[in-house]
Amino acid sequence: MMKNIVQALNKLNPRMVFGLMLFFVLLLAFEGWILLLRKPYAEYQQILSTRESLMASLQQTPNQSNELGQITADLKRLSEKLSSELRSPASDDKMAASLMEALDHSARLHGISLASLKPKERKQVSVFEEVSFEVSAKGSYLQLCTWMLDFAKTLGNSATVTEFEMKTANEGKEVTLSMNIALYRPLSLNEVAK
């Protein structure tokens, strides 16, 4: 069999055999080059696409100094809001007078008559002192509801209505409202440590 192959090759033109061998060697070299360089070329293409997407995202992001200025302004505004809400009169008399004045003013705006305001027990809740008051008022149902919904503006976020009860009065013409309001003021470091 080997003899037959050698005889067939001897019949061929030596230039053609050399050309075919050179073609196969070049074909193998090209295939090897493709196999070896395909992975690095794909990685290079991925790096280029990543670079382009990062450049596009960098161009879309706003200026960080503007963001920093806006964050600083928001922080200052929130700090002022928090400190104003935590600031309450130092003495209990001033706190009760301040609460009574705020509730009375708000009640007059809503057409309600404030009947009474009585201080109740105090207790410590976390780092705050909870000071409770019992409040009674009279008026129409809708006026009382509107008045209670307006408490966030009247008392701020440091006050909470803990209980309330509504009853009809004067043959259903008026409604009496009894509720407990809790005010929270921060404790001093000495009081928190106890």
Image: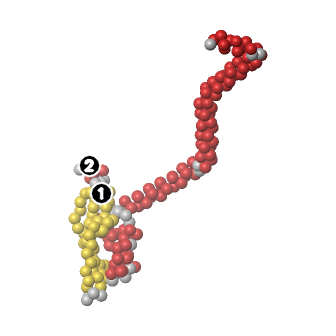
Q: CA distance from mark 2 to mark 1?
A: 12 Å
Assign a secondary structure to mark 1.
Answer: strand
**Residue at 51% in and 55% down:** 73
Q: Position of residue 183 (x, y in %)?
A: 31, 64
Is 76 left or right of 122, judged from the image as shown?
A: right
Is 137 left or right of 74, judged from the image as shown?
A: left
**Residue at 61% in and 40% down:** 49
Q: Amino acid at mark 2?
A: Ala
Give the position of the N terminus as an image quadrant: top right
Q: Earlier in the sequence, mark 2 or mark 1?
A: 1
- Nearest to viewer (mark 2 / mark 1): 1
Q: Position of residue 48 (x, y in %)?
A: 63, 37
Residue under numbered circle 1: 128
Q: How is the image coloured?
A: secondary structure
Q: Position of residue 194 (x, y in %)?
A: 23, 50
Assign a secondary structure to mark 2.
Answer: helix
- Which residue is at the front of the view, 101 or 11? 11
Q: Are marks 2 and 1 in contact (CB under 8 Å)?
A: no
Which quadrant of the view contains residue 178?
bottom left
